Image (spheres, rainbow, N blue to C red):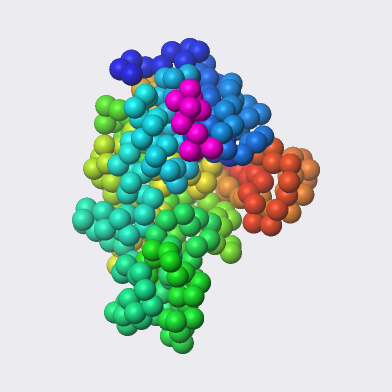
Amino acid sequence: MTDPLKTGDMIGILGGGQLGRMLSVAASRLGLRTHIFEPAPNPPAADVAYQVTTASYDDERALVDFAKSVNVVTYEFENIPTSALDILERHRVIRPGREALRVSQDRLIEKTFLNELGLTTAPFAAVNSVDSLAKAMIDIGTPAILKTRRFGYDGKGQMRLGVYSDPSEVWQHFEGQETVLEGFVDFSHEVSVIGARSIGGDIACFDPGENVHRNGILHTTTLPARLSASQRTDAILLTAKIMTTLDYVGVMGVELFVTASGLIVNEIAPRVHNSGHWTQNGCAVDQFEQHIRAVAQWPLGDGSRHSNVVMENLIGDDVKRAETLSKAPHVALHLYGKAEVKPGRKMGHFNRISAKD
């Protein structure tokens, strides 16, 4: 694909969750169609996408048919099987590219990549046995967090270790998995930058947002974040550096810890990001449209912030607040269409806007 997508062209999206849903809505506003590939039946994105394929990622025939039906392939989550990507890439370009997925799918590779760029991360060590865990706990110290190298998100696949943690007992929970031990970071707060990069190398970053987590899941993102002018510049420049090095096309989320000695990179996400949902009501062009523009080879849009925003996730039974929120002034409600409420499940979010300072 060498030309910008035009009206009626199709973008393939791997994953049909709420991010795929909101990407589909953004595409439709630009006159583009989306085709969702999702193993689970009746995903949230099915309500708004032009077409849905329900098949597993090891179904080669379904993957080939999906690829041939679209102009370009993108994704709403990073843990896509390599075998599926190999099949898709033989037929259609994937954006963002495979290198971004390779780096972000494995925490050890990701942190090594960031250090090689000259960026600061928490101290870390690869752990693949009880002996290597014991050594890492001595070398890095405690408190620390042991995480699986792959597949963990929203607080899953990790355990906090203290000075009295027994390596043998801890390893029983992780045996057979590749893990990484991350040292504790003394930070005042967490921020994230949502950046976008076009196929031509143009970069646009949204204002950094300040994040608060509860039980390992994002609770709120507040704009503006508590950052000095120099910290804000550093956050945007390092995000641009990561995207440029990866020859990235699309939207990326970069999570950062704010410390007395500077910014520390926590992790990167090669996709639209929960902490960027505030852009839906705080900017003329939100993160979802920006991603669609990038993968469709359109120019990046104006992502400047016109309002202060507090984004709050609706987790599990929080969705029962929806009726009250729907009547609240200066509140934009976004529900994901999930029929079943589960503890820890993201059911929606809302943006509360106010005049920009």
Residue at 37% over, 73% down: 129
On whether residue 179 falls in the magenta region, the answer is no
Q: Which image quarter: residue 296?
A: top left
Question: Residue lying furthest top in this view?
Answer: 7
- Quadrant holding the N terminus: top left
| Image location of residue 104, percent across then percent down | 36, 49
Please indicate, yes or no, whether residue 308 appears anywhere in the rendered image: no
Q: Is residue 4 left or right of residue 241?
A: right
| Image location of residue 349, percent across then percent down | 63, 45
| Image location of residue 69, percent across then percent down | 48, 19
Residue at 46% over, 50% down: 209
Q: Which image quarter: residue 263?
A: bottom left
On whether residue 62 falls in the magenta region, the answer is yes
Q: Is residue 357 above or below residue 295?
A: below
Residue at 39% over, 63% down: 178
Q: Is residue 109 left or right of residue 336?
A: left
Main SS, magenta residues:
helix
Q: Which residues are magenta?
A: 56-66
Please indicate, yes or no, whether residue 264 appears anywhere in the rendered image: yes
Q: Is residue 213 above or below residue 196?
A: below
Q: Is residue 350 left or right of residue 297?
A: right
Q: Nearer the viewer, residue 1 or 275?
A: 1
Q: Is residue 46 above or below residue 236?
A: above
Q: Nearer the viewer, residue 206 or 136?
A: 136
Q: Which image quarter: residue 16?
A: top right
| Image location of residue 54, percent across then percent down | 59, 32
Q: Nearer the viewer, residue 240 or 123?
A: 123
The number of numbered badges drawn on the structure is: 0
